[in-house]
Image (spheres, rainbow, N blue to C red):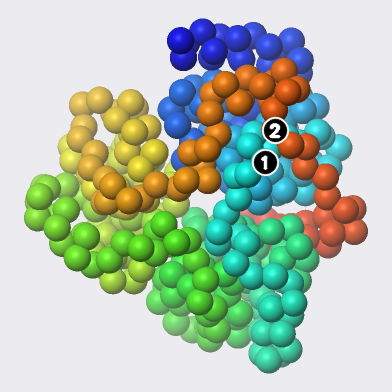
Amino acid sequence: MIKDLQQRILKLKKERDVCILAHSYMPEEICEAADFTGDSYALSVKAQTAPQKTVIMCGVRFMAETVKMLSPEKKVILSNPDAGCPMAEQFGVEEIAKLKKRYPGHAVVAYINTTAELKTIADVCVTSSSAVKICRAIPQKNILFIPDVNLGSYVQRQVPEKNFILVEGGCPIHAMIKKEDVVAVKAAHPSALFLVHPECRAEVVEFADYVGSTSGIMEFAEKSDKKEFIIGTENAIVQHLQYKCPDKKFYPLSKELICHNMKITTLPEVLGCVLGTCGEEIVLDEAVRAKAVKSIEKMIEYGG
């Protein structure tokens, strides 16, 4: 049973000095067994201060890489080696290097949903919750924003004083949602507030009552005195909120909002990672790590 697996994981992780991180898009049964849940960057910060020497990242590869970048002395395990991120893997270093030459003087602002290699040529990283603040704070007026065109266009609308060059990349799951989907679900639930992630298209975001990161969406819904919400991000958030707020109603924006890379990690695999029979240890070349982490350090400098 699920609870039996969870109890084994809870017992073994203490005995083996293991910290388990679970991204918010993980299933509820995995989040319940984790030490920390949240967005990718927040989990990386938690890993830095966690006393354990081994960290299991229940998420996707770029998240585990970010943990390793910030905690190089720790053993970092990606729960499922096949868990990638289509957005993070859309562009390589050579492609963005060509854009840098084409737009000299532009600050390369990289969404944290990028590979360690791509972070090596970025000036600063951003998260979905800090992107607006950081783009306002950096001294450069001209910005090359990679890789998510939807997040970039959202930031562009909030920071009109800066000049943005955007690339046609992004999250294929969020980007598939269209205006018609919002109109239909709002018609079905007219009293519900619409909470949306900025990785969605502008035509979707414009209907929102709140725009923010997954953690921001959850916090807004938990604190709100309203009772009904349409959730415009991965459907795991609908599930988590139903557990956290059983007196409220949560509706998915679309049944298609499912990240298959997040869903391939299972609770038995998490147990296997604790036992040392599953997962993949993340190893980064030190030169790559040292160069890539500078963009995150700049993110902390400008965004806190």
Can residue 137 be seen at all in this image of the molecule? no
The residue closer to the viewer here, 94 or 144, is 94
The amino acid type found where label 2 is placed reads Gly
Mark 2 or 1, nearer chain start: 1
Residue 283 position, x and y percent, is 83, 45
Name the residue at 34% across, 27% down: 244
| Numbered-mark total | 2
Q: Residues within 10 Å of mark 1 (few under 14, many from 20)?
A: some
Can residue 185 be seen at all in this image of the molecule? yes
The residue where tag 2 is placed is 279
The residue closer to the viewer here, 289 or 6, is 6
The residue closer to the viewer here, 75 or 297, is 75
The residue closer to the viewer here, 91 or 25, is 91
The amino acid type found where label 1 is placed reads Pro
Give the left or right position of residue 275, taking residue 91 as reference: right
Q: Residues within 10 Å of mark 2 (few under 14, many from 20)?
A: many
Name the residue at 22% across, 60% down: 181
Residue 161 position, x and y percent, is 49, 84
Name the residue at 21% across, 60% down: 182
Please, what secondary structure does the residue beneath circle 1 have?
Answer: loop
Quadrant hosting residue 18: top right
Q: Are marks 2 and 1 in contact (CB under 8 Å)?
A: yes
Please, what secondary structure does the residue beneath circle 2 have?
Answer: loop
The label number, if any, that marks residue 81 in the structure image: 1
Quadrant hosting residue 111: bottom right
> Whole-Å distance between the Cαs marked 2 and 1?
6 Å
